[in-house]
Image (cartoon, rainbow, N blue to C red):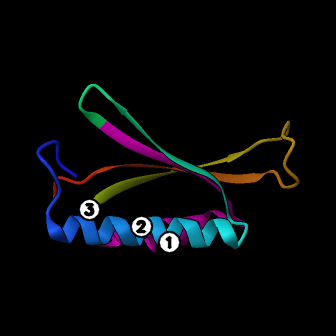
Amino acid sequence: MLASGSTEFESRIVSGHFSYLKQLTSDGMVILAGRQNTDNSSFGIVLFNAGTVEEAREIMLSDPAVKNKVFRAELFPTKWPCSALTTQNRAITHLTQSNDI
């Protein structure tokens, strides 16, 4: 979304993005998701469980905001051997506003 405000299309897609993350959280896939907003730049981070890098990429690419090019996403597969969580395979998605729309 732009600093000057979002379009109706962007607002609808971002609402779908939020619903998608809420569903993944309910399904136990998302560990945390949030937005950082500083100095006119905004980005989000999603930490989720995935069995494989391919599964992680599919989760990321299925996000309505990524599919509709409202957000760009980068995938950072990682393992967390020292974690209080039960599984070690994680993926972090970094989301930023897309300039494609």
Q: Residue at x 17, y 57 (%)?
A: 6
Callout in the foreground (1, 3): 1
Question: Which residues are drawn in magenta?
Answer: 42-68
Q: Pick the quarter of the image with the C terminus.
A: bottom left
| Location of mark 1 (residue) | 20
Residue 84, compared with residue 7, is above or below; it is above
Look at mark 2 in the image and give the residue it sits on: 17
Residue type at the position of mark 2: His
Q: Residue at x 16, y 69 (%)?
A: 8
Is 15 colored magenta in this rendering?
Answer: no
Q: Decide: marks 2, 3 in contact (CB < 8 A)? A: yes
Which label's residue is closer to the chain start, 2 or 3? Answer: 2
How many C-alpha atoms fall within 10 Å of the one at disc 2: few (<14), some, or many (≥20)? many
x and y percentages locating residue 45 in the rendered image: 50, 46
Q: Position of residue 81 (x, y in %)?
A: 84, 40
User: Would you say 3 lies left or right of 90 here?
Assistant: left
- Disc 3 marks which residue? 70
Closer to the chain start, of discs 1 and 3, is 1
Q: Amino acid at mark 3?
A: Val
Residue 19 placement (x, y as % from top left): 48, 71
Residue 80 lies in quadrant: top right
Disc count in the image? 3
Residue 67's tag is: none
How far across and how far down the image is residue 29, in percent? 68, 65
Q: Secondary structure at mark 2?
A: helix
Kind of residue at disc 1 = Tyr
**Residue 73 left/right relative to 78:** left
Mark 1 surroundings within 10 Å by alpha-carbon count, few (fewer than 14), some (14 through 19), many (20 or more): some
Residue 60 is inside the magenta segment = yes
Query: Which type of secondary structure does the marked residue at label 1 adopt?
Result: helix
Label 2 close to label 1 by CB (< 8 Å): yes
Q: Nearer the viewer, residue 2 or 88?
A: 2
